[in-house]
């Protein structure tokens, strides 16, 4: 091996060592013990991790269980004030590179707990983040809930919902079709995470979106940069006075 090749190899190892792991968040609204929704999310998350590691892309998974946060979510919905635990969950979601969103289906609709949590998110918290949609239900009669309710919900939040979603009923757990669908969805998520497509889209389009001032989005500092703090309105809002040449 030449000196140039040895240097390139050392540089490559250093680069890999300094690379920050991709942050994947599993958001689960399952409340059972054990929860089939959580089990499905874990299965998808593990497959995604396996695919990323095969591509030499280190990654971690952080789980947000909504069940233990149910009271905090209800209080925040009424008061607008988040508890420390709820705020920590929001911050983990804000810093995620990708999300697996899993909910049970009740009476042909997504979990009220899941929807209440999503209602608390800033509109720019998930901009261009890859989202893998997953749901569990008691029968196949609810199979369209993912596309009819979850997909429009995350489209409103301007997230990148993956083409393949994962839906499971009790009889699906032993079927090979579920494993194939998990593999396909995890492949889509791993590719988007590894290539950084979502981050590039957000970087290029961030200033063209409307943002929540002082929100939880990881690019909040860019939001403030887009605000003209020297305008008459902002000076008055901060207790100042109009500019001398203002009418």
Image: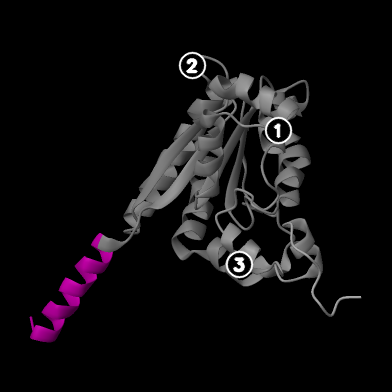
Magenta stretch: includes residue 11: yes
Q: Secondary structure at mark 3?
A: helix
Figure check: 77 above or below 49? above
Residue at numbered disc 3: 201
The residue stretch that appears in magenta? 1-17
Residue at numbered disc 2: 34
Foreground: disc 3 or disc 2: 3
Label 2 packing within 10 angstroms: few (<14), some (14-19), many (20+): few
In the image, residue 215 lies at what x, y percent? 64, 49
Magenta stretch: includes residue 58: no
The quarter in which the N terminus is drawn is bottom left
- Upstream in the sequence, badge 2 or badge 1? 2
Q: Is residue 176 left or right of residue 154?
A: left
Q: Secondary structure at mark 2?
A: loop
- Upstream in the sequence, badge 3 or badge 1? 1
- Upstream in the sequence, badge 3 or badge 2? 2
Q: Secondary structure at mark 1?
A: loop
In the image, residue 40 lies at what x, y percent? 52, 31
- Alpha carbon distance from label 3 to label 2: 38 Å
Using the rendered image of the protein, determine whether residue 171 is visible from the camera's viewpoint. Answer: no
Residue 247 location, quadrant: bottom right
In the image, residue 185 lies at what x, y percent? 54, 47
Residue at numbered disc 1: 80
């Amino acid at each position: 091996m030449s000196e140039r090749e040895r240097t390139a190899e050392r540089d490559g190892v250093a680069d890999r060592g300094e690379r920050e792991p991709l942050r994947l968040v599993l958001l689960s609204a399952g409340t059972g013990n054990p929860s089939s929704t959580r089990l499905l999310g874990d299965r998808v998350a593990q497959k995604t991790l396996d695919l990323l590691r095969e591509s030499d892309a280190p990654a971690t998974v952080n789980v947000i269980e909504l069940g233990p946060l149910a009271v905090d979510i209800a209080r925040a919905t009424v008061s607008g004030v988040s508890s420390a635990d709820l705020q920590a969950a929001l911050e983990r979601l804000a810093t995620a590179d990708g999300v697996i969103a899993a909910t049970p289906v009740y009476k042909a609709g997504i979990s009220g707990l899941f929807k209440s949590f999503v209602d608390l998110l800033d509109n720019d918290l998930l901009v261009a983040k890859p989202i893998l949609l997953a749901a569990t239900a008691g029968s196949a009669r609810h199979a369209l809930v993912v596309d009819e309710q979850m997909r429009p919900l995350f489209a409103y939040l301007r997230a990148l919902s993956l083409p393949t979603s994962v839906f499971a009923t009790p009889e699906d757990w032993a079927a090979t079709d579920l494993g194939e669908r998990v593999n396909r969805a995890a492949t889509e998520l791993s590719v988007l995470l590894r290539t950084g497509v979502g981050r590039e889209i957000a970087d290029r389009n961030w200033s063209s979106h409307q943002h929540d001032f002082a929100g939880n989005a990881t690019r909040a500092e860019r939001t403030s940069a887009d605000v003209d703090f020297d305008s008459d309105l902002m000076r008055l809002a901060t207790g100042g006075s109009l500019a001398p040449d203002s009418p």
